[in-house]
Image (cartoon, rainbow, N blue to C red):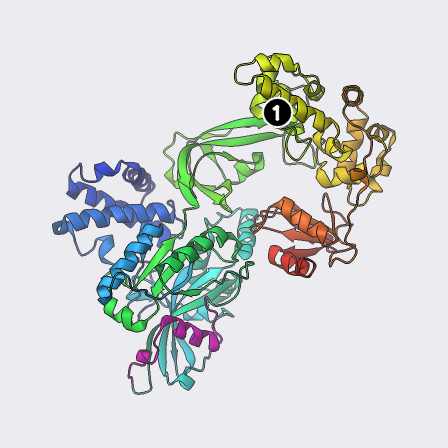
Amino acid sequence: MFSKDEQRSLFELSKQLLYSPQADLFAESPAERVEDLRRVLRYHEWRYYVQNDPVLSDFEYDQLYKQLETLEAAHPQLIVPDSPTQRVGKDLTENAAQVSHLTPMLSLDNSYNAEDLSDFDESVKKLCGLDKDSDIAYCVEPKYDGGTIALVYENDRLTRAATRGNGYVGDEITANIRTLRTVPLQAAFSQKGIAKVELRGEALIRKDIFEKINKARQELGEQVFANPRNAATGGLRMKDPREAAERGLEAFLYQLGYAVDADGNDVMSRFQTHDESIHLLESLSFKTPLAKGGTQQHLPATKTCRNIAEVIQFCNDWQEYRDEYPYELDGMVVKVNSLELQEKCGYTSHHPRWAIAFKFKARQATTRLRDVEFQVGKTGAITPVAKLEPVPLAGVTVSNVSMHNEEFIRSKDIRIGDQVLVERAGDVIPYIVKSLPELRNGTEQEVVYPKHCPVCQSELVKPEDEAIWRCENAECEAQVLARMVFHTSKHAMDVEGLGESTIEKFYKLGWLHSIADLYRIDYEAVAKLEGFGPKSAANMRAAVEKAKKNPIQRLLHSLSVHHLGQKASKLLAAEVEHVLDLRNWDLEKYQTIKDVGPVLARNVFNFFQNPHNIELLETMERLGVNLRQTDEDKKADVNTDGPLYGKSILFTGTLTQMTREEAEKRAAAAGASIASGVSKHLSILVVGEKAGSKLKKAQDLGTVEIWNEMEFLERISSSEA
C-alpha cells in the first residue's frame, strides 16, 4: 500500500524520468537512476494490476520499463532478483486462492514501428540459422486490452481458471470464468487425443457495454473506470460470481500453452503451426481471434503473413481501423507461425523470442491541467476549454481539450492543477477521462464558472432544457465574429478565401460589423493589404459573388440559428418561395414539417420575429444575396427503391468508419430522409461511440429502431452493390 504522499512523489518522479532528455539516462549515477526507475515501476504496477486504476498510459509505462532494461544491460552488476525486469508483471490479489500455471505465462517484448518489426525478423532468422533473405511466416492477431487468463480442461471439462498473476502463479477465478458464455464448460479435446490442456486467452468487455457500465457508475456517484481493461480485470476478481457476470465479460482464447494425452505424454508436437492450433480451438466452439467483429470485412482480425513486409502492412492497416473493432485493442501480436521455429528461438526470462507486440500509438496519457478558459460560440454557448501541459497522444501533441459544460467539470471533480487522464477518442477528439485526486498536493483550485460573459460581460443565462450557460447578447463581439466565420465556412455559404484569420483581421480593421458586411468588402483596400495583393482580392471577390447565388438552404444554415442544421435547412427551403416568407409563419406551422421538433421550431420562429434579423436579410438581398428558392432547394433525389425508403434516420456519437457527412449521404442514397433531431417521427437512430442524450431520448420513446454502425452498413449494402 502506498500513502498519498508517496503516490504524489512517485508520480512526479515518473514524469521527470519519462520526459528527461535521453542523454540524461547515463549522465547521473546509474545506480541511483536504476533505483528510481524500480521504485516508480513498482508503484505503477500496483496502480495498474492491483488497483485497476492506472495513472500512466501503457506507452508511458513501457518507456520507463525500457529505460530500466537499457541501464541494466549496460550495468549488469546492478541487476537484482526483485527488479521489475526479472519477473513477469504481477497482478496477484491479496488473500485470493492462488494456483500454479502448467507452463509459464511470459510477457511480450514491444515494438512501435516498422523498423522494430524488421529488427525482430532479423533476430528470428539468426536464432533459426536462416539466411537474411529468407521469408518466415508469421501469424498476426489482435492484442486485446483486457485481463489475461489461463483455462485448464481435463477430460473435456473446465476444471480451473486463473489470472496470469506473476506468470508462474495466478489468482484462481474458476467460479467467475464459468459465468462467461463465451467459455465452454465442456470441449471435446478427447476427440483430438488430448486429456489435459491449458489455454491462454483474454477476458474483455465490449466497448458499448463498457460505456453503459461507466454511465451507470457515474449516475451512482461512483468512480468511473479509466478504460475497458480496468473494468475487465476488476470483474475477473469479483468475490461474487453474479457480480462478475453483470460486467458483460467475454473471453477470446488464442493459444495452446500445454497439452498432454491420457498417459501424460506431450502432444504439442502434433501441431506444426500456431494458426493450426487456433483453428482447433475455433472448431471446439471457443471464441478466438478468427471471430468476425470489424465492419471492414476485407480486413480480417487474424492473418498468416508470408514475410515481415506483409506483417508490417497488416499492422499498419489495423492501426488505421482499430476503432471499428467492437473490443479495445492496443496493438497486434506477431508470432512465428512454425512451432518448430518457435522452439529454435526459445525464451528469455521475460518473453518468448518468437513473438513480439506491435503497439498502436498511445491514446491515453496523464498531464497537468494548467488553466481553464471560457470561449463564446456563435449562438452564445459558453464552453470551458482545458489548457493542458502539452502531451503527445496518438501522433499529435494535445494542449487544449473541450470540457463541454459545468456539469462535466463538477461530475468529474476536475480542478486547476490536477493531474488528469486524457484520451483521444477515435484518435480524433481529445477528451478528459478523469482527474487523479489522489495526486493532489493542496495547491489545486476549483474551477469557478463565470456568471458573466468573458467577452462582453453580459449576465449569463442557463435555459431550463439545456446544460449550457449562454450569453444572450447577440452583439457580443465573440458571437459576431463566430457567426461570420461560420457563415463563410464550407458547410454554410462556402466562401473560399474568407477564413477565420482573414475575418478576424478585417474585423479589427473595422471593415466588418455583421454578416452583411461580408458582401460589401472594399476589394481595392484588400489588394493594398500586406499579404494579399490584387490577385487575392480578385479571387475573394469571385468567391463572394459565387456565394451570393447559393440556394437558400445554404443561406438558412449559415444564419447560426440554434439547432438549425443542414438537413432542417433543406426541409424549410423546400417549403417557401422566399426566405422572408418565414416571418409570416406561426409556431404551429413549423411543427407540421416532419423532423422539425418543438425546440427547433421555437428557435427559428424567434429568429424571424426579430426585426434586426429581418433587416439583416433585407440588406443582404439588396447586396445581391439570393433569398429565393432555386431548383436545388426543390430537389429531393429520393431513391424510392432503396432499402431505407420512407424511413427517417439520425446519426449520433462518433462514427469510426466514415464521417457523419458521408454516412448521411449514404443513407440518403438508400432512400432515407435525414432527421434533425429525435422525435416521435424518427424511424432509426444510428449510434456511434460516446453517444449521449439522443440515445437516451430514443430509448425512452420506445418507437425508434436503434442500430450500431455495422448494422447500418449491412442494411444499405444492397443499394450500394
Mark yes or no: residue 599 visible.
no
Q: Residue at x 50, y 67 (%)?
A: 291
Q: Is residue 694 above or below residue 718?
A: above
In percent of width and height, residue 296 lies at: 54, 58
What residue is pinned by disc 1?
Answer: 498
Spot the residue most to the left: 77
Q: Which residues are magenta?
A: 264-289
- Identity, as a three-letter code, of the amino acid under mark 1: Leu
For residue 48, side relative to residue 564 (left or right): left
Q: Position of residue 533 (x, y in %)?
A: 56, 17
Query: Is 305 covered by the magenta stretch?
Result: no
- Residue 692: x and y, percent? 61, 46
Residue 278 lies within the magenta run? yes
**Quarter of the image where the C terminus is located:** bottom right
Residue 138 appears anywhere in the view? yes
Quadrant of the image occupied by residue 524: top right
- In this view, which residue lies farthest toward the front? 535
Disc 1 on helix, strand or loop? loop
* 252 or 272: nearer the viewer: 272
Report the residue at 27% width, 58% height from top. Answer: 122
Q: Which one is nearer the viewer's eye here, 435 or 550?
A: 550
Left or right relative to 161: residue 78:
left
- In this rendering, the answer to whether 206 lies above or below 528 is below
